[in-house]
Image (cartoon, helix red, strand yellow):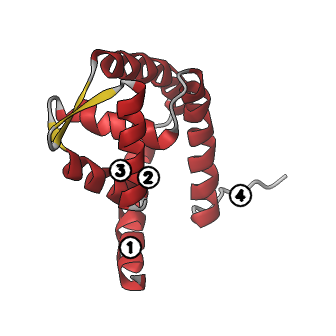
Amino acid sequence: MTTTTPTADSRALALAHYAARGVLESVLTRYDVTFQQSVTLRALAVAGGPTDREAVVGQVAGSLKADPEDVRGTVAELVGKGLCAAEGAALRLTDAGREFHAASTAETAEISARIWAGIPAEDLAATGRVLALVRERADAELAALK
């Protein structure tokens, strides 16, 4: 019996992405938070304090390749849910937003640890280099298409 090592390609990347995203969305559903809302809240959590609204919109839109207007709508949803607050041109996490972020991050960290367990460090390093190059090239192609 001969087994072949799978080749990394766009399909393999997409299948891994959607499997991991499916896990995350299963967790987020229990909190009534969407994927885009969680990415936006993470941007605020990492910032550590009040952050310019348009900087957050730009960061999330750039990361998700989303329409900035859609991200502005996501911000409005989060304000409506009480997970972040608008203070003039700035946004900040509320206590409820911090609690959500801490709880969902802890829950997904446990799952992620199981998913990534046992993968050799050199494989993770090589994968990281390849994914960074793929992202860079895809970003360049996307920019050329615009």
The x, y position of residue 105, in whole percent, is: 41, 23
Mark 1 touching mark 2, by CB under 8 A? no
Amino acid type, residue under disc 1 in the picture: Arg
Q: In this rendering, does residue 49 appear at all?
A: yes
What residue is shown with label 3? 72
* Dot placed on the residue nearer the N-terminal end, 4 or 1: 4
What residue is shown with label 4? 4
Q: Is residue 16 above or below residue 87?
A: below
What residue is shown with label 2? 127
Q: Is residue 138 above or below residue 30?
A: below
Q: In this rendering, does residue 128 appear at all?
A: no
Camera-nearest label, 2 or 4:
2
* Number of marks drawn: 4
* Dot placed on the residue nearer the N-terminal end, 2 or 4: 4
Amino acid type, residue under disc 2 in the picture: Thr
Camera-nearest label, 3 or 2:
3
Camera-nearest label, 3 or 4:
3
Q: CA distance from mark 3 to mark 2?
A: 33 Å
The x, y position of residue 46, in whole percent, is: 23, 33
- The residue sitting at 39% across, 64% down in the picture is 135
What residue is shown with label 1? 137
The x, y position of residue 5, in whole percent, is: 65, 56
Q: Nearer the viewer, residue 141 or 55?
A: 55
Mark 3 touching mark 1, by CB under 8 A? no
Amino acid type, residue under disc 4 in the picture: Thr
